[in-house]
Image (spheres, rainbow, N blue to C red):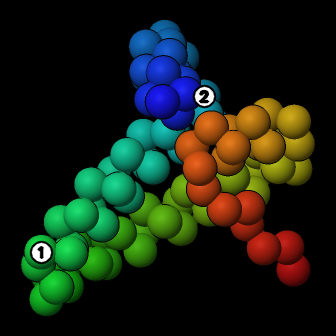
Amino acid sequence: MVKNSFISVISQEENKGSVEFQVVSFTNKIRRLTSHLELHKKDYLSQRGLRKILGKRQRLLAYLSKKNRVRYKELIGQLDIRETKTR
């Protein structure tokens, strides 16, 4: 459970504006909404919210990968999410 300890360390940080904190909080929201949508398949408003959060997280991860590739690799490894596709 290395992921949970990393998430708790990030969430206890004072810097709530950091890219890492925002990505972790978006990831938590995405996981919560995904489990909600498994039960409520026709909740289209939640589907829209999920797509918006996914886009925000994707943009933040793209920014982080440009600015600091090492921190980006660490973060996606800890959160167990896939690397974004490059164009």
Q: Whole-Å distance between the Cαs marked 2 and 1?
A: 33 Å
Question: Residue reaching furthest front?
Answer: 1
Along the viewing direction, whichever of 3 and 53 lies nearer the viewer? 3
Q: In the rendering, at what x and y percent does residue 47 appear?
A: 28, 78
Tell me where residue 82 sits by quadrant.
bottom right
Q: In the rendering, at what x and y percent does residue 57 appear?
A: 55, 56
Identify which amino acid the numbered label 2 is placed on: Ser
Q: Could one spot residue 61 in this view of the protein?
A: yes
Residue tagged 2: 18
Residue sitting at x 75%, y 36%: 74
Tell me where residue 39 sits by quadrant.
bottom left
- How many discs appear? 2
* Secondary structure category for the residue under label 2: loop
Closer to the chain start, of discs 2 and 1, is 2
Identify which amino acid the numbered label 1 is placed on: Leu
Q: Could one spot residue 17 in this view of the protein?
A: no
Residue sitting at x 30%, y 66%: 34
* Secondary structure category for the residue under label 1: helix
Q: In the rendering, at what x and y percent does residue 53 appear?
A: 43, 62
